[in-house]
Image: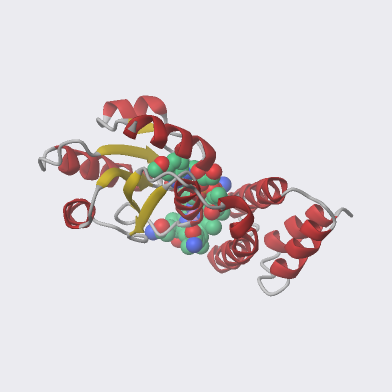
């Protein structure tokens, strides 16, 4: 079994203590950080499918998420790097009612890597909290909203509406997460959409330049 396959198997099995060591071993063997990350993202898809089919339950899903987060911690310095440019501040969070944060954390990491100062509000963030953070932090150029549940899409819409009606001129809004599409982003009035963390960094740069 390849080292990346081992990492994937241990993420799927929720072995949070083993994953960081295996990720380091995979790097030491010469695997690219991006490939290891891709493998772990695939594993979360497998976990989701097993949850849907009743093979796994919430505690196992939680352990898989913890395992992936520990693995990402090892990759973080390799995926971010130092950016010389400053693109301003980005306020990011997962919308109200939604506790999923792995994708949001990856997007935050990528935004930092291209030169944003990131203010991460965490998960279950109300529309009001997004607006207050956009007003209270210096040089905010972008608000980024993540959401993974179809049931929290109305909260995303509410967040975009409130941001747009709060007189925050010049602040762009980007949205994303598995149930979000370009079409939905346009319908709810967001300025941009990206399907993944790399795409979010590209789109975010485009929106503020
Ligand atoms: Co939940 N969960 N979960 N879960 N969970 C999903 C999302 C689900 C698809 C699983 C399934 O049924 N197959 C399903 C949602 C179904 C739906 O709404 N259509 C689901 C469900 C139902 C639930 C609960 C309701 C289960 C329950 O309690 N009965 C519950 C809800 C809790 C809540 O939020 N209120 C729940 C709970 C949890 C855990 C807490 C156990 C855990 C999350 C832990 C954590 O995040 N710290 C969890 C997990 C781990 C998952 C799955 C398995 C994995 C999610 C993940 O981290 N993926 C997920 C199944 C799946 O995704 N296939 C599932 C990896 C991550 C890298 O991908 O987050 O999609 P993702 O991010 C991507 C892109 O979407 C994008 O970039 C990222 C990577 O490049 N992206 C953006 C994300 N945000 C972006 C923002 C952007 C741009 C791009 O711009 C701002």
Q: Position of residue 129 (x, y in %)?
A: 21, 57
Quadrant for the N terminus in the image: bottom right
Query: Residue 158 at what x, y percent from top left?
Result: 21, 43
Residue under the point 17% across and 57% down: 136
Q: In which quadrant of the rendered view does residue 206 lie?
A: top left
Residue toward you, 92 or 54: 92
Q: How many marks?
A: 0
The residue most toward the bottom is 17
Task: Identify the residue shown where x is 59% and y is 64%.
Answer: 73
Q: Is residue 177 visible?
A: no
Residue in view at x 33 percent, y 42 percent: 153
Whether residue 110 is visible to the viewer of this picture, yes or no, is yes
Q: Find residue 53 and report its horizontal and vertical position in percent.
A: 62, 50
Colour treatment of the image: secondary structure
Q: Name the residue at the front extreme.
A: 84
Is the C terminus in the top left, top right, bottom left or bottom right quadrant?
top left
The residue under the point 79% across, 50% down is: 31
- 14 shown above or below 117: below
Q: Nearer the viewer, residue 53 or 195?
A: 195
Asked whether, in this view, residue 61 is left or right of residue 161, the answer is right
> Relative to 53, is 88 on the left or the right?
left
Q: Where, by quadrant of the figure, is residue 186 drawn?
A: top left
Indicate the quadrant where residue 98 lies.
Answer: bottom left
Q: Nearer the viewer, residue 154 or 119?
A: 119
Work out whether residue 89 or residue 83 is closer to the camera in this orientation and state it.
83
In this rendering, position of residue 36 left or right of residue 85: right
Residue 66 image position (x, y, % from top left): 57, 67
């Amino acid at each position: 079994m390849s080292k990346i396959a081992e990492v994937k198997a241990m993420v799927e099995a929720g072995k949070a203590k083993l994953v960081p060591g295996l990720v380091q071993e995979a790097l030491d063997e010469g695997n690219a950080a991006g490939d290891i990350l891709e493998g772990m993202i695939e594993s979360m898809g497998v976990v989701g499918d097993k949850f849907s089919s009743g093979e796994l339950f919430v505690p196992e899903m939680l352990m898989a998420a913890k395992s992936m987060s520990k693995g990402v911690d090892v990759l973080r310095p390799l995926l971010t790097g130092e950016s010389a440019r400053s693109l301003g501040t980005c306020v990011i969070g997962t919308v109200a009612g939604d506790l999923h944060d792995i994708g949001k954390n990856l997007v935050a990491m990528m935004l930092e890597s291209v030169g944003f100062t990131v203010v991460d509000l965490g998960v279950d963030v109300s529309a009001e909290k997004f607006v207050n953070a956009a007003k209270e932090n210096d040089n905010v150029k972008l608000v980024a909203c993540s959401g993974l549940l179809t049931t929290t899409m109305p909260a995303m819409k509410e967040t975009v509406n409130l941001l747009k009606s709060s007189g925050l001129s010049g602040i762009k809004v980007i949205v994303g997460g598995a149930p979000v599409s370009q079409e939905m982003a346009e319908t709810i009035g967001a300025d941009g959409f990206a399907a993944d963390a790399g795409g979010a960094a590209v789109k975010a740069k485009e929106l503020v330049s």
